[in-house]
Image: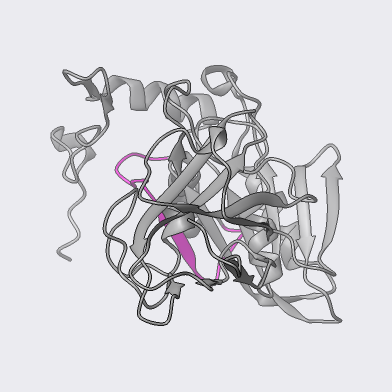
Amino acid sequence: MSQTIPPVLSVHPTRALVDEAFKVVVTNLPPATPVTLHALHYSEDKDYWEAFGHYISDHRGMVSAAQHVSLGGTYTGIEPMGLLWSMCPEPGSRTGLRLRKRIVTSPMLIHISVYSGHITVGFRNQTPLASVLTERWYMAPGVQRVEINDKRVRGTLFIPPGPGPFPGLLDMWGGGGGLLEYRSALLASHGYVSLALEYFSPGELQTADLQIQYFESAFNIVKDHPQVISDKVGIIGLSLGAIIAFYIASESKVAKPHCCVCISGHHIFAFGETIGSVQREQQKELKARVDENNYRIWRDVRLPVPSDPSEKIDVST
């Protein structure tokens, strides 16, 4: 593409939270010119993730991701944020990858570029017409990150900027174990005091001996914080964390959540005495299978209605 004035790529804002929209616009193109918008991220796990869309510049020589149709790529149609939500590992990458942020005190760095023509592979071996480096943050300016590590609870507390008081959340992830902070950091960036709770280390699930009191103590750390509205504390849980949230909401005499958000969990069996007992009970009912592509399918792990009559409760009275 030869022209006197080079194309101009603008991304606004270049620094934002991960859930904030941005605008990607290319100007100074010749009319009806095919170009490719491309996003590239090098993850903390040292893998390249990318997304791209194929566009044709309009009569003004402009391409806008918010106004123009992507004709191909990792997304199609008018998708203002397609360069982010459609990211996938670069061809030839390791299999079974997940894109997630472990260090929330630093941003995700994403290179937004525009290339001549409609291309699908080999982006890093070509020279873009223009490129902009953007920052995507989970932790907004002014959010406090406080490590909690005592005999009662392990986790990280995130506090929004300002005096408060704020609503609070207990944030629990699933059976993979470890401490994941990015959801709590983002929640704090939107005005919630959130405690990312670690309740066992990776690989410890079968032997984890934590009882309900551990989670009640964590809930009370949030509830009793001076910047938290004590009767506006909820729980968000994923998978095993959702099972625990269900149990706390229904059975605990100490923790009384104002609301619960339970993602990909169920409430069919009781929590039991320890975390390990939940896993052992779940293994008895495991209906996961492997398909012809060697993907593990969890759709039928547990049906909504138990097959064992002893697990059913008559609620008609």
In the depicted view, which residue is nearer to us: 170 or 271? Answer: 170
Q: Position of residue 242 (x, y in %)?
A: 45, 48
Q: Quadrant of residue 255?
A: bottom right
x 53%, y 50%: residue: 39
In the depicted view, which residue is nearer to us: 261 or 45? Answer: 45
- Color style of the picture: one colour
Is 125 above or below relative to 284?
below
Q: Quadrant of residue 88?
A: top left
Quadrant containing the C terminus in the rendered view: bottom left
In the depicted view, which residue is nearer to us: 288 or 296? Answer: 296
Point out the stretch of residues depicted in magenta.
Answer: 253-270
x 47%, y 25%: residue: 277
Q: Would you say residue 307 sits in the magenta stretch?
A: no
Secondary structure mostly seen in the magenta stretch: loop
Q: Would you say residue 265 sits in the magenta stretch?
A: yes
x 57%, y 49%: residue: 128
Q: Position of residue 166 (x, y in %)?
A: 72, 78
Q: Quadrant of residue 56?
A: bottom left
**Residue 296 at least partly seen:** yes
In the depicted view, which residue is nearer to us: 5 or 140? Answer: 5
Residue 220 vs residue 210: left or right?
Answer: right
